[in-house]
Amino acid sequence: YLDKFDEKPIKSAAKGTVELGDEDERKAAEAALKTQSENHAELLKSLQQALDEHVKEVRLTSRLTDSPACLVGSDYDLTPQLERMLRQAGSEAPEQKRILELNPEHPLLEKMQRLATEDTEAFGNHAFMLYSNALLAEGAELPDPARFHRVLASLMLK
């Protein structure tokens, strides 16, 4: 059982919030996230409404560099892998909503912010694809593969 390395606690990057860097870097990142959260408040609210059945929270993060989004759990949630293993073993595993974290630096967020006010149908499709992409990135199954196929095909046609 390994819970520390060099006197630092080991923590899963897939759960809770991640604090990277030294204290000054963390404070700068928190201040930047607060400002970006205020700038994207309407987008975060719209995404929460569009994905409410799938996620418990939508928030910005500083943990992402290239990806537009990722899914994380709360500190005490089951991991998706453990949840799948319990279900495969025939145990009752409560379905847990996860947290969708967004990269505030990704250009996709600007496009989605425009869609949230200009084209709500397209916004709903983009929100679903963003969530589905985050699921695929972690190796999870899609909640609605047929819808994913339809939306992907329509987006590719555009």
Image (cartoon, rainbow, N blue to C red):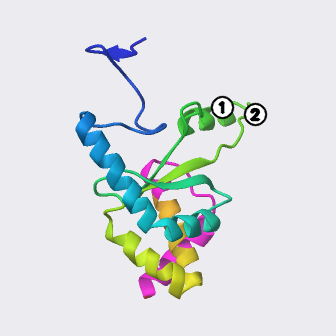
**Residue 156 counted in the magenta span:** yes
Q: Which residue is mark 1?
A: 86
User: Does 39 appear above or below 16?
Assistant: below
Q: Quadrant of the N terminus?
A: top left
Residue 60: % across, % down:
43, 55
How many numbered tags mark residues here? 2
What's the residue at 40%, 70% (across, down)?
A: 109
Task: Kindly check if marks 2 and 1 are in contact, taking CB atoms under 8 A apart as contact.
Answer: yes
Residue 5: name its quadrant.
top left
At horizontal 63% and vertical 47% (from top left) the residue drawn is 97
Vertical placement of residue 89 versus 59, above or below: above
Q: Which residue is mark 2?
A: 92
Give the spatial CA distance, label 2 vs label 1: 7 Å
Does residue 35 belong to the magenta stretch?
A: no
Residue found at the very far top of the displayed protein: 1
Q: Secondary structure at mark 1?
A: helix
Q: Residue at x 57, y 70 (%)?
A: 46
Q: Position of residue 137 (x, y in %)?
A: 42, 53
Q: Which residues are magenta?
A: 134-157
